Image (cartoon, coloured by chain):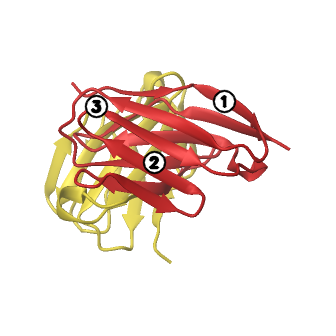
Chain colours: A red, B yellow
Amino acid sequence: KQEVTQIPAALSVPEGENLVLNCSFTDSAIYNLQWFRQDPGKGLTSLLLIQSSQREQTSGRLNASLDKSSGRSTLYIAASQPGDSATYLCAVKSGMRFGAGTRLTVKP
Amino acid sequence: EAQVTQNPRYLITVTGKKLTVTCSQNMNHEYMSWYRQDPGLGLRQIYYSMNVEVTDKGDVPEGYKVSRKEKRNFPLILESPSPNQTSLYFCASSGGRGGSYEQYFGPGTRLTVT
């Protein structure tokens, strides 16, 4: 059964720092991996989708990578801002499994 | 505007009283799904649908029913709600073969069963 783990569970950084969020999965037979952002009490906003044949995707200050062989994905956020504060979730499509998320706080 | 809508957004009900949460998408997506989100357990898939009249169980289907009579709608039915179904529910849709494209989520329905 596919299991998805996100480390760390929480992260606090000063504004302007570059940071990396980690996502690992146990079964490399995935269709794709998607990163989401969730604000408290709100729905999920899609950030980046990486298909299984791709290695990375970029959008603005965000860059996500995928290494299926090692069962890992990273989300890199450059020049973090207080508005980036949220919970970040990764999800793998093999069935559909979500990680528990990383709660990010960016301090002004 | 491309979106997934859910209704109601908030619902308080009593044990055993049948309820339906509606979900609709305007993106002509074939794949739709329902999730519940609980503290400490994260998001778990309840049911999904690959196309009209095609539905399948996710990880936590017990106590729920779904139907997919039209492409745009995917209602979630709780025939006899119980307190352990108190949760935050999300509907999602995606395009591509087997829903392989980006998933779009609705705003969520917060359900309380007393």
Mark 2 belongs to which amino acid?
Trp
Chain to which mark 1 belongs: A
The answer to whether tags 3 and 2 share a subunit is yes
Circle 1 sits in a helix, a strand or a loop, which is it? strand
- Tell me the quarter of the image containing the C terminus of chain B: top right
Question: Is B84 left, or right, of B60 in this rendering?
Answer: right
Q: Residue at x 39, y 73 (%)?
A: B26
Question: Is B10 left, or right, of B57 in this rendering?
Answer: right
Mark closest to the chain's N terminus, 1 or 2 = 1
Q: Which mark is residue A100?
A: none
Above/below status of A29 relative to B55: above
Quick check: can you spot residue A66? yes
Q: Which mark is residue A11?
A: 1
Q: Which mark is residue A35?
A: 2
- In the rendered image, residue A36, in percent from the top left (x then y), is placed at 49, 48
Question: Is B103 left, or right, of A101 in this rendering?
Answer: left
Q: Residue at x 45, y 24 (%)?
A: B41
Mark closest to the chain's N terminus, 3 or 1 = 1
| Image mark count | 3
Q: Residue at x 22, y 48 (%)?
A: A31
Chain to which mark 3 belongs: A
- In the rendered image, residue A16, in percent from the top left (x then y), is placed at 76, 48
Distance in Å between CA atoms under marks 1 and 2: 17 Å
Q: Nearer the viewer, mark 3 or mark 1?
A: 3
Circle 3 sits in a helix, a strand or a loop, which is it? loop
Above/below status of B46 relative to B70: above
Quick check: can you spot residue B105? no
> Quarter of the image holding residue B39?
top right
Mark 1 belongs to which amino acid?
Leu
Residue receiving disc 3: A70
